Each structure stands twice: as structure tokens, then as C-alpha cells.
């Protein structure tokens, strides 16, 4: 699954952030003018996910892994909820494979 941040949100006017839900983890793409940043985080390394959803505006997702925080901003509340559910399902599958 692919989720794209809204171009109306702060910091996403030209190059919106993207989150890809894959079988073994998530890929976050943060494009830039001259370069971009792509990160892959496997489900078993994600310790938690937090969502900040204001009454009006776009949601911010925070992924915690290996003592680091990765922030993605500009997603609708519905997209943020779907991303969280997909990550929790992926984390459960990953823990079942290990055990």
C-alpha cells in the first residue's frame, strides 16, 4: 500500500512525503529538491507508533525504532489510522515468525 501526504500540508507543497507498507516493513520517502531521503524500517524494529491528529489539519506520525524517532507529517486522519493498523498487523506477523 502507498500513502502520500497532502500537498496542502506544511513541508509537502512540491514534494510530498510517501509511506509504503510492505510485507516486511515500511519505507518512508522524504523527497527534496536536489536529494531525498528514503528509509526502510522492518516491523520487528518498530517499537511504537504515535499519531498526533489535531481537530483541524493533517496528522503527524512518529515511528520509534532502535532508540530513534522518525516523523512523517501531512497525512489524513484516515490514512494515519490505516498506516497504524497495517504496522500493528505487520508487527504481529513478524513476532509470530520469530516465536
Image: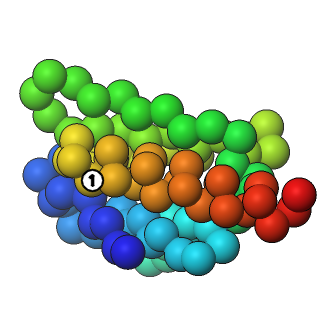
- Residue 94, compared with residue 79, is above or below; it is below
Say if residue 32 shows up in the picture. no
Image quadrant holding the N terminus, namely: bottom left
Residue lying at the far top in this picture: please name it.
55
Q: Can you say which quadrant of the picture contains the C terminus?
A: bottom right
Residue drawn where x is 77% and y is 59% of the image? 96
72 on left or right of 92: left
Q: Nearer the viewer, residue 28 or 7?
A: 28
**Relative to 18, is 60 above or below?**
above
Residue 98 placement: quadrant: bottom right
Q: Tell which of 72 and 47 is nearer to you.
A: 47
Q: The residue tagged with tag 1: helix, strand or loop?
A: helix
Q: Is residue 37 left or right of residue 44?
A: left
Residue with the mark numbered 1: 79
The residue under the point 58% across, 44% down is: 63
In this rendering, does residue 14 appear at all? yes
Corner quadrant of residue 69: top right
* Residue 77, placed above or below residue 37: above
Tell which of 32 and 59 is nearer to you: 59
Please identify the residue farthest to the right as the structure is shown: 99
Q: Position of residue 74 (x, y in %)?
A: 27, 48
Residue at 55% from the left image edge and 49% from the top image edge: 88
Toward which corner of the image does residue 7 lie, by quadrant?
Answer: bottom left
Q: Position of residue 85 (x, y in %)?
A: 43, 50
Q: Categorize mark 1 by other alpha carbons within 10 Å: few (<14), some (14-19), many (20+).
A: some
Amino acid at each position: 500500500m502507498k500513502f502520500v501526504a497532502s500537498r496542502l500540508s506544511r513541508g509537502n507543497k512540491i514534494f510530498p512525503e510517501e509511506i509504503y507498507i510492505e510485507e516486511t516493513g515500511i519505507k518512508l520517502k522524504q523527497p527534496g529538491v536536489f536529494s531525498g531521503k528514503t528509509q526502510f524500517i522492518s516491523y520487528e524494529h518498530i517499537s511504537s507508533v504515535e499519531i498526533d491528529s489535531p481537530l483541524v489539519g493533517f496528522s503527524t506520525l512518529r515511528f520509534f525504532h532502535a532508540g530513534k524517532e522518525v516523523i512523517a507529517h501531512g497525512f489524513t486522519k484516515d490514512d494515519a489510522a490505516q498506516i497504524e493498523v497495517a504496522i500493528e498487523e505487520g508487527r504481529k506477523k513478524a513476532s509470530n515468525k520469530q516465536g
